[in-house]
Image: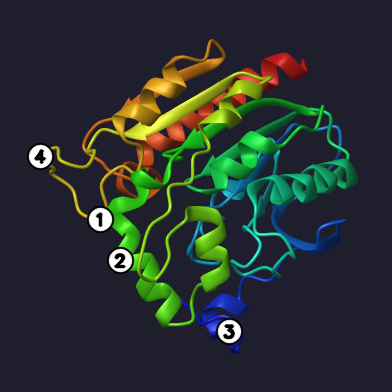
Amino acid sequence: MVPLGQTESPLMSAFPPLATIATSQGAVPIWGRLSGRDRPLLFVVRGALPRRDHMLSLRRIFSEIDVALVHLPGMHSPFFARHRPEAFAVAFDEVLMRLGHSQVLVLGASIGGLAALCMRSPTIRRAILIDTPLTTSGLSPIQDDLRRAVQAHELAREWLEAITGIFTDQVVEVDYRHLLNDVRVPVTAVFGAEAPGVARSGTGPPSLVPEADRECYRSQPNVREIVVPGVGHNISGGATQRFIEILQAEVAALQVASA
């Protein structure tokens, strides 16, 4: 991870964005492949502290549709004045309006799923959330990692405090469960089976979605749950084939709706 404000490494500069779109909240760089507005669009919102090229391979795997990927503001992208999922969503909705696709599947990875839940573009037909926690308690396995990222200047302190409630010397619970009350499209919520406190076979952090959050997901009639065995939070990297299969099913459902 290259510290914010420093020159990017050659590896990261090898993945320039397709374009940067001005929005009412700030500039949003987009990556991926865009061929025409008549094709369905997979719109990916990546999470906190990802590689710049994270999930960029989806543009090759899903060659039959358009793929656009964005980072959360402050993650390989300019900061916004407001560090809130609602502000991020406003900007991403405006990006969708500019792109002009009429059939969109939104994928929100980890914390990126919070912004996905707030998006209200009428072009969104489906959404898939990958291990997206709804409460700060779900982030307990990586709290120290996030604080270290702040100390290493890889993450802005204000961003971390506003989004997660994780401060240097305390944790203030931030609850996003209410975002599920306004779900308007079918949502597939994908969780890693290896949750905190459960015997694990893999490496990396456990799932960041505690049982209380999962119950909240299950209570929503528009939400379908998928639990991926043998993996924790890093589903796309730790269970890549299963992740692709789940996403292929979502893309197929979008294509049927677009026909």
Relative depth, front residue between 241 and 143: 143
Report the mark closest to the observer, 3 or 2: 2
| Label 1 crowd (10 A; few <14 / some 14-19 / many >=20) | few
Q: Which mark is residue 244?
A: none
137 is higher (above) or lower (below) than 219: below
| Label 3 crowd (10 A; few <14 / some 14-19 / many >=20) | some
Relative depth, front residue between 180 and 253: 180
Give amino acid for label 1: Gly
Tell me, yes or no, whether the two marked residues, 3 and 2, touch with CB atoms within 8 Å.
no
Residue designated by label 4: 199
Q: Is residue 105 left or right of residue 95?
A: left
SS of the residue under disc 1: loop
C-alpha distance separating marks 2 and 1: 14 Å
Mark 1 or mark 4: which comes first in sequence?
4
Mark 2 or mark 4: which comes first in sequence?
2
Residue designated by label 3: 8
Give amino acid for label 2: Asp
